Amino acid sequence: MFRKLLLVAFVAFVAVLQGCATAPPAEPYDPLTMAKVYDTAEGGGPGGGTFFMLAEVNGKPTAYTSWSASKRASFGQGMFMRIVDVERPVPAGKVTLKLKAMTDYAAPIQSIFARKSEPLEGAIEVELKPGSRYRVTGAMDELRNEVWLEEVQGNQLIGRKIVSAPTAAARLAATADLRYTCCNFHHDGDAWISDANWIDQPFVPAGTPLRVYEVGGDRAKAMVDGKLMWLGLDYGRKQQTMQQLIGKLTTADDPKTRFGTWPADIQAAVRAGKLVTGMTKEQATVAIGHPRTDLTSSPDLPRWRYRTQRDLEFVLVWDAEQRLVAVEAPAEVRPLVVFVP
């Protein structure tokens, strides 16, 4: 009899554990009277995760968050944090929302030895539009500790940011190895910065603060203006190392102090991520980034070759004085490259 009771208790215990890993149940949603708000998270795996979430709606705690769902999904995974996204309906109109940001790990022992940012939370009063989608996002590193709400359509900030200033000691430690983007970094629209440098993708502006860490092989993590991103050596592996690529893409001095002295038309082109004839090689590089080394083996060449993500090629042509004299590009690519005041 005792063994049977133990067996029943064990089965019940396993069932509870399995239930902890299930996804949150779907809640009723009416697009005429409700909006949707979803949590975001960064990281995962043995490095833990950073969670930006909606903790309360009009004083009522939310049933599930990206943090609680990720903790459930990570149960039994050892030190591997499995990130789970959570989205829930929220009444449209004027509401009070409590936002929260925190870092955490799959195993409690990881939290003991890891350097963690202090949790941050605060309430905002906003007006949500029926049928619209919003996300809770933010930044947590040595220099920034922020969480905010933004509308998915257009990435527009809603309400105010909840901000906790880092300590003076944290700022000093962070600035010890702080660097800047040398040029406009094209990326995949999310978090991948490839040496492909596709001109038809969005970019992180030149002079953006960043810290590079966990360099390994042809990949490196980077905290870019408070956002976790990846640098990838995808095409030029035979021509350069990852450390050489990092040396090209980052600089210890903020390039904005230099291009602030350039002619007005060149400054405008750089801000747009485009080119104008008469630019120097430095100015063109700041504007659109370095060419791929597998296409252009040396910056001393009179022709620099670039490609779009659709594999359409365009060429920068330099004269003997190292000035840009022409951009050879297909008609559909020229508007992406050539600046028109």
Image: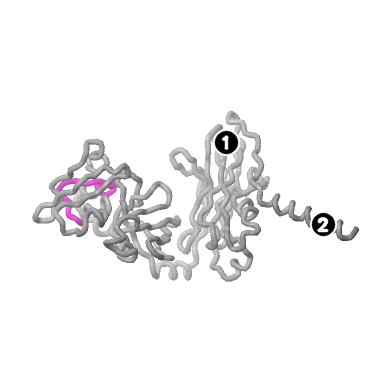
Name the residue beneath numbered marker 1: 35
Q: Quadrant of residue 78 in the image? A: bottom right
Q: How many marks?
A: 2
8 lies left or right of 213: right
C-alpha distance separating marks 2 and 1 = 46 Å
Residue drawn 29% across the image and 63% down it: 240
Residue stretch rendered in magenta on the structure: 269-281
Q: Position of residue 13 (x, y in %)?
A: 76, 55
Q: Is residue 280 magenta?
A: yes
- Magenta region, mostly helix, strand or loop? loop
Which amino acid lies under the numbered mark 1 shown in the image of this protein?
Ala
Helix, strand or loop status at disc 1: strand
> In the rendering, which numbered label is found on residue 62?
none
Please, is residue 34 above or below residue 63 in the view? Answer: above
Ranked by sequence position, the earlier of labels 2 and 1 is 2
Please, is residue 36 above or below residue 77 in the view? Answer: above
Between 35 and 261, the residue placed more toward the observer is: 35
Which amino acid lies under the numbered mark 2 shown in the image of this protein?
Leu
Helix, strand or loop status at disc 2: helix
Q: Position of residue 16 (x, y in %)?
A: 74, 52
Between 282 and 232, the residue placed more toward the observer is: 232
Residue drawn 63% across the image and 53% down it: 73
Rendered-image quadrant of the N terminus: bottom right
Name the residue beneath numbered marker 2: 7
Between 148 and 196, the residue placed more toward the observer is: 196
Q: Nearer the viewer, mark 2 or mark 1?
A: 2
